[in-house]
Image: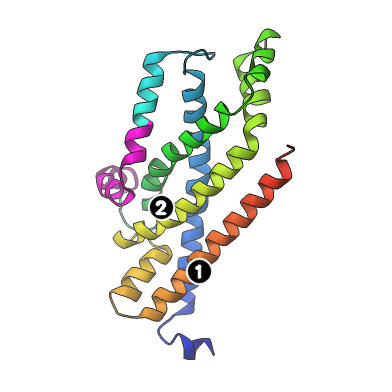
Amino acid sequence: MLNDLFPNVQWDRMWEATFETLYMTGVATVFTFVIGLALGILLFLTSPQQLWANKLVSWLTGSIVNIFRSIPFIILVILLIPFTKLLLGSIRGPNAALPALIIGAAPFYARMVLIALKEIDKGVIEAARSMGAKTSTIIGKVLIPESLPALVSGITVTAIALVGYTAMAGVIGAGGLGTLAFLDGFQRSQSDVTFVATILILVVVFVIQFVGDLITAKIDKR
């Protein structure tokens, strides 16, 4: 039945490409969460009237975040080719896409972290400071728990963006459904391959959104 509807689709390659997309998205999301969270907290704490208030550090961090957040992803991939080749020895395959995926998504998520932290009631932070809590305690016991629903919602949005990034990276041979849709689908005029790859990408996006919304609803006590 499926072979009649999609005669050009090689299902073993399609499932392999789906796994590669999930691998790239999953690994990049984990690193993006860690790096983006660290950058977002640094931006928050070095802003005026905060614990580590420092105009220079805040400006430098903000500038780096804004620069990498503003570069279109496909251009960022091309700019990072020498760095990726030096780091991994190749610019092809799922692993070769990871540096660009992480560098492209972490600044985006850092801004979402900053927005989430700014929404925290200042009184809660001041209360912790007045009780002599250390900065590490304030981060671990106040900032992250209070902003957790927004942080989860933000990483969900970022993970979905990363799925799109993997598809774009596929144009230069990063692997995954993007490569399959472009090389086998578009370049060989096999529209059924492109269609199936697109459907699978949409399924991945819907699953990520569903899981993210479910987790957010579970931890949001408001």
In the rendered view, would you say 181 is above or below 214?
Answer: below
- Residue range (magenta): 65-88
- The residue wearing badge 2 is 95
Q: Is residue 85 magenta?
A: yes
Residue at x 38% of width, y 41% of height:
103
In the rendered view, would you say 119 is above or below 164?
Answer: above
Q: Position of residue 8 (x, y in %)?
A: 40, 84
- Quick one: quadrant of the C terminus? top right
Marks 1 and 2 sit apart, C-alpha to C-alpha, by: 21 Å
Residue at x 68% of width, y 19% of height:
124
Q: Nearer the viewer, residue 124 or 17?
A: 124
Residue at x 45% of width, y 69% of height:
198
Answer whether labels 1 and 2 touch (C-beta < 8 Å). Answer: no
Q: Amino acid at mark 1?
A: Leu
Mark identifier at residue 200: 1
Locate residue 127 relative to residue 177 in the image: left or right: right
